Image (cartoon, rainbow, N blue to C red):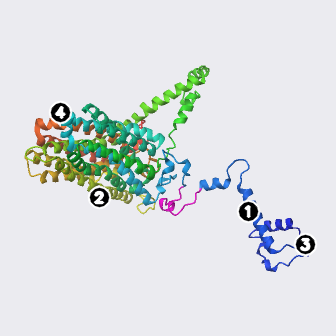
Amino acid sequence: MASMPLPALNRVQSSTGPTSPLARVPTSSIPEMPNAPPPAMLERQRTNSTSSRASDDTECTSCSVSCGDAVRDEQPQLGPVVSRLVAGPSRIIPRLKRRGLFATLSVVPEIEDPFQYSRLTKKMITLVVAIAAAAAPMASAILFPALAEISTELNANQTTTNLSVALYMLGMAIFPLWWSSFAERVGYRTIFLISFMLYIVSNVCCAVSVNIGMFIAFRVASGASAASAQTIGAGVISSVWEVRERGRAMGYFYLGPLMGPLLSPIIGGALTQKFGWRSTMWFLTAFGAVVAVGIIFFLPETLREPKNNRPLLSEKQMLEKGDLEASGANEGVRGLQRTLSKVSTKTRRKVSQSVVTIKVLFVDPLRSLLYLRFPPVLITVYWASLAFGALYMLNVSVQKNFAKEPYNFQTIIIGLLYIPNSIGYVLASVLGGSWNDLIMRRAALNRRASSDTPDSDEPLEYLPEDRMGINAYIAGIVFPLALLWYGWTVQNGVFWFVPMMATFTFGFASMLVFSVATTMLTEFVPGRSASAVAVNNCKPSPPHPPLFVRNICACIGGIIAEPVIQAIGNGWLFTILCFVGILSCSVVWVMQKYGPRWREQAQHGEYKFL
């Protein structure tokens, strides 16, 4: 057989694939050709040819990056650690393309579909936002044992000093509207970090305050910045937990805000008695710094941008280009557009940027209040706000009455008296979330059983109003009766353990109310089924009205509690609250009867503002 030149031999070898007959012929069966190179040299040439082809195929001649790198960016290989953090097939965002402040420092990767995080990752994210959400109620309750000392040192009367708590709640009421609006544009992570940086600075200023005015002003700033955690924390939970598990997840999330009132009066009483009231502010500063570090390393961005939301850049471009036709302008306006097009581009850009800035800062945040025009949101928010306002009146009463006859407790003991109702919060948060999910699932099963296809394999239909079942009736009746119990026992100087059992009962029942209301409102988005809400509703908008209204009620309760107690006493104050609370339990019946109708009306577009 004549010898074959090496290039020709290489072409034959490169053309042989796994299905080629020549590729299946054993090397030992090929007769040795005269003047052919030794087998070792052939193997080296074959290897070099293969590597050369791989380089030619992967190196892109039209750009400076290789196509192989691009493919790896799209489908990154999961290492052993990342594989434990991500359970599903969702694509991992490359580190340099992740959203949010200091996003490259996050240990948990950002992924396209946060539902695909592993349960370990979801629990870690829930823990981070729960601890962050504890900052606001902790800063509120930590001052209760110290109010008398603050009043003495800063030369203020007791009512004025109470404003440091009441106006703190006012800041928590108003600023969630702004945090939520900004979060929808820049993401949860960025807002978390910015707000906690402001929280740290505000508490430092509170610690060095020289008069009551300065102290109250920075307390308002502290409440305003801490409010972001509870506002967008519910949005984070909704973005990573599916609807069938969300009730339990919300329960665990609210352990954070409830552990604040549990621990902070104890911490506040101990610090105040040992180091003075200013030490409580330094403690809050350190706590805020720890939370900020946790957010940097363990909270990825989980916000999905809704498809029907236009980004800020699109609004600017629309205004800069004068695209009034896209906004539904008529012919006369388009004629005006041609006239305005002669104006300098620089002037038009400044005007458009000013309009967009005003819209973002003053118009968009107030849109959340439009949810209050939707009846299910309005009545549910009212119900939760009533319980929250009663809570702050109860807190002021505990601080006022147990510091005087017949109890005469010291500051640190008064701090311990806030433990029973906080234990009730924690128990209701752990047990109530699972109970909430169970009631919702039972309602979905009953609906399927009564349908035309009871044996269908289709997923269960979860409706938001299903969360208001027997759990809501029990909570709505028990928490007013617990207020009545507390009011008359403390009015008559009964042994301290008896009114403390009343505060425990109130804490348990009121937490059931908060849990049901907040979880339902994160899902009550018109025009979507509950399952679709689990995928699409990652915006924090629905929880804002309850935060706004309930913190307003807490502010009012904190201001009027002491004057009303002095005027009519604890017994009659909490009797009035009990009567109003029992009447308000009718909210549950109204939601069960009219909730489906309101949801259908919203789906047909009768509520244009939604």
In this view, the mark in front (4 or 2): 4
* Residue 330 appears in the picture as rendered: no
* Residue at the disc numbered 3: 3
Q: Earlier in the sequence, mark 4 or mark 3?
A: 3
| Residue at x-position 85% and y-position 72% | 37
Q: Earlier in the sequence, mark 2 or mark 3?
A: 3
The vertical placement of 532 against 46, above or below, is above
Q: CA distance from mark 1 to mark 3?
A: 26 Å
Residue 14 screen position, x and y as percent: 79, 66
Q: CA distance from mark 2 to mark 1?
A: 62 Å
Label 2 sits on a secondary structure element that is helix
Residue 106 screen position, x and y as percent: 48, 52
Q: Nearer the viewer, residue 340 or 138?
A: 138
* Residue at the disc numbered 2: 431
Which portion, as a residue range, is magenta?
A: 75-90
Q: Are marks 4 and 3 in contact (CB under 8 Å)?
A: no
| Residue at x-position 73% and y-position 58% | 55
Q: CA distance from mark 4 to mark 3?
A: 110 Å
Q: Judge the density around disc 2: few (<14), some (14-19), many (≥20) Cα neighbours within 10 Å.
A: some
Q: CA distance from mark 2 to mark 3?
A: 84 Å
* Residue at the disc numbered 4: 157
Q: Earlier in the sequence, mark 4 or mark 2?
A: 4
| Residue at x-position 49% and y-position 61% | 87
Q: Earlier in the sequence, mark 1 or mark 3?
A: 3
Q: Judge the density around disc 3: few (<14), some (14-19), many (≥20) Cα neighbours within 10 Å.
A: few
Q: Are marks 4 and 1 in contact (CB under 8 Å)?
A: no
* Residue at the disc numbered 1: 51
Q: CA distance from mark 4 to mark 2?
A: 42 Å
Label 4 sits on a secondary structure element that is loop
The vertical placement of 465 against 82, above or below, is above
Residue 295 left/right relative to 503: right
